[in-house]
Image: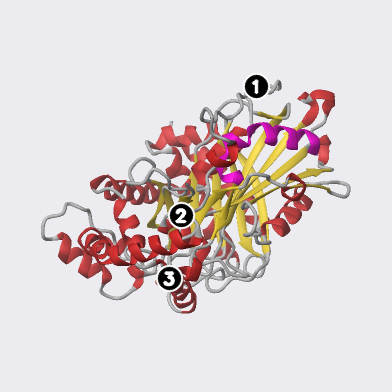
């Protein structure tokens, strides 16, 4: 039987418009000199995918909508994935530099996925400098989060240039493959299930009120409503031990408000050992250093334009809830924590200390209570109304008070070399989502083989000079490294 999308997963379908696109992606840079014949080819990628598709379920599922929108959609297994459609090939003109590659990938990232097919695309890009190639892979956020996205890519990767042997999928004995594959319920059954969920919603609403109202100050958009924090604190005073979150006013910036359909992208790498040196010198975490680097880069970018707000920027930080939520099939096991980053502090060491304190409060908050309230929050509304509410909330927030200024995400990855079709993975630059609500900048970081790979997706109209941010990140790390040397 086909799996149904959770309410959280369906939200990524609900808010998608011509400008708010809901897919995440990765740009993998490969050195093909280690591959057979010194080349990574489209035929080789298709052959690898066809052998390992069962290891990456999101790549073989397509959406099945419920009649009348009574319930969240279902996933059904596509029995014949069309690799001619999903796997493309393109070449950069000489000289094939990073800026050309980023411009091409930004255009690819600015197009919607076809919901009639499995929600993914892969582009093999030739013509990079030094004979390298790139693989751009995008998958809809309703099917994966940052962690599962890394797992999907891992299914295509190996620890040696020689691809490992992967056993074929196991099928139940005496059951034809067309019967064992995941199928969505028929239309009548989907309607019956949808009506049943409507009847259950009052119960879900009660659970939500009991568990989520004390945490209204964590909910993006809702937390910006006057009085939401006060209500949360009053209710928590009745016996919960959740630490209070500071009131976070979201300042207006050049990247606030409704975004355009056009993207820009920049990427860069920082040495992980240098970040760890800063971490050890100041007694903070790697993530604290990453957040401080981002705060420094954003502060400098805003100050250069005479747009630096007096208040600190408010950032959404995806936090994994893997294993906490009561559902055995959630594509997105993540919630969004809100915190202020000290873009208002000029001194780099004081800025790092302030980041560390803010992140400790976020951790204490999530340690004090499980994140299951967010699932209750999204499940408490009938699916048909949920889609309308998601879109209405996005429109309201983008035109009134923004819920946050941007999203910063840090995804851990493997610390040993990986290979695709024999080609060595040089870097893995992540790409994520910008929206009217979350702001026109998204900074995502992926750690790989001793490096931190930064991918910055922006709205082209709001941030035309995105490469400056990569330069500012490098300068910020040099500044902290110098301070760390003096500290020791």
- Label 1 environment density (alpha carbons within 10 Å; few <14, some 14–19, many ≥20): few
Q: Which residues are magenta?
A: 41-60
Name the element at disc 3. Answer: helix
Cα–Cα span, label 1 and label 3: 45 Å
Could you say which is closer to the camera, residue 254 or residue 381?
A: 381
Looking at the image, is mark 3 or mark 2 earlier in the sequence?
Answer: 2
Which label belongs to residue 5? Answer: 2
Q: Which residue is mark 1?
A: 164
Name the element at disc 2. Answer: loop
Q: Which residue is mark 3?
A: 384
Residue ID at (53%, 73%): 257
| Pair 1/2: label in front | 2
Name the element at disc 1. Answer: loop
- Label 2 environment density (alpha carbons within 10 Å; few <14, some 14–19, many ≥20): many
Q: Is mark 3 in CB contact (under 8 Å) with mark 2?
A: no
Residue 472 seen by the camera: no
Residue ID at (33%, 43%): 324
């Amino acid at each position: 039987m086909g799996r149904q999308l959770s309410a959280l997963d369906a939200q990524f379908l609900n808010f998608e418009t011509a400008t708010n696109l809901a897919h995440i992606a990765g740009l993998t840079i490969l050195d093909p000199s280690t591959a057979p014949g010194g080349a990574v080819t489209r035929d080789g990628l298709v052959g690898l995918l066809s052998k390992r598709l069962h290891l990456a379920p999101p790549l073989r599922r397509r959406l099945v909508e419920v009649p009348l929108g009574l319930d969240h959609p279902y996933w059904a297994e596509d029995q014949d994935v069309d690799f001619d459609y999903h796997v493309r090939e393109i070449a950069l003109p000489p000289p094939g530099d990073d800026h050309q590659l980023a411009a091409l990938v930004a255009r690819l990232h600015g197009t919607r996925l076809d919901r009639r097919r499995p929600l993914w695309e892969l582009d093999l890009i030739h013509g990079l400098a030094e004979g390298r190639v790139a693989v751009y892979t995008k998958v809809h956020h309703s099917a994966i989060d940052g962690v599962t996205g890394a797992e999907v890519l891992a299914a295509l990767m190996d620890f040696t240039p020689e691809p490992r042997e992967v056993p074929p999928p196991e099928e139940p004995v005496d059951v034809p493959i067309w019967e064992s594959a995941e199928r969505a319920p028929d239309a009548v059954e989907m309607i019956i299930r949808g009506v049943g969920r409507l009847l259950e919603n009052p119960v879900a609403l009660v659970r939500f009120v009991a568990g989520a109202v004390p945490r209204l100050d964590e909910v993006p958009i809702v937390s910006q409503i006057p009085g939401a924090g006060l209500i949360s604190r009053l209710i928590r005073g009745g016996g919960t031990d959740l630490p209070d979150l500071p009131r976070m006013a979201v300042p207006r910036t050049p990247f606030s408000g409704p975004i355009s359909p056009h993207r820009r992208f920049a990427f860069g790498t920082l040495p992980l050992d240098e970040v760890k040196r800063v971490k050890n010198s100041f007694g903070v975490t790697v993530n604290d250093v990453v957040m401080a680097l981002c705060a420094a880069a954003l502060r400098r970018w805003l100050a250069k334009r005479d747009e630096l707000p007096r208040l600190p920027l408010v950032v959404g930080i995806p936090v994994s809830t893997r294993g906490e939520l009561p559902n055995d099939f959630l594509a997105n096991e993540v919630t969004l924590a809100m915190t202020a980053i000290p873009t208002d502090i000029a001194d780099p060491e004081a800025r790092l200390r302030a980041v560390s304190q803010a992140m400790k409060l976020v951790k204490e908050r999530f340690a004090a209570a499980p994140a299951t309230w967010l699932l209750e929050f999204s499940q408490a509304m009938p699916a048909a109304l949920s889609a309308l509410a998601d879109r209405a909330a996005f429109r309201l927030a983008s035109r009134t008070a923004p819920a946050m200024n941007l999203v910063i995400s840090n995804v851990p990855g493997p610390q040993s070399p990986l290979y695709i079709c024999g080609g060595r993975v040089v870097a893995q630059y992540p790409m994520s989502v910008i929206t009217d609500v979350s702001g026109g900048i998204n900074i995502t970081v992926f750690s790989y083989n001793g490096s931190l790979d930064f991918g910055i997706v922006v709205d082209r109209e709001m941030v035309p000079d995105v490469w400056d941010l990569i330069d500012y990140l490098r300068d910020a790390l040099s500044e902290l490294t110098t301070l760390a040397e003096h500290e020791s």
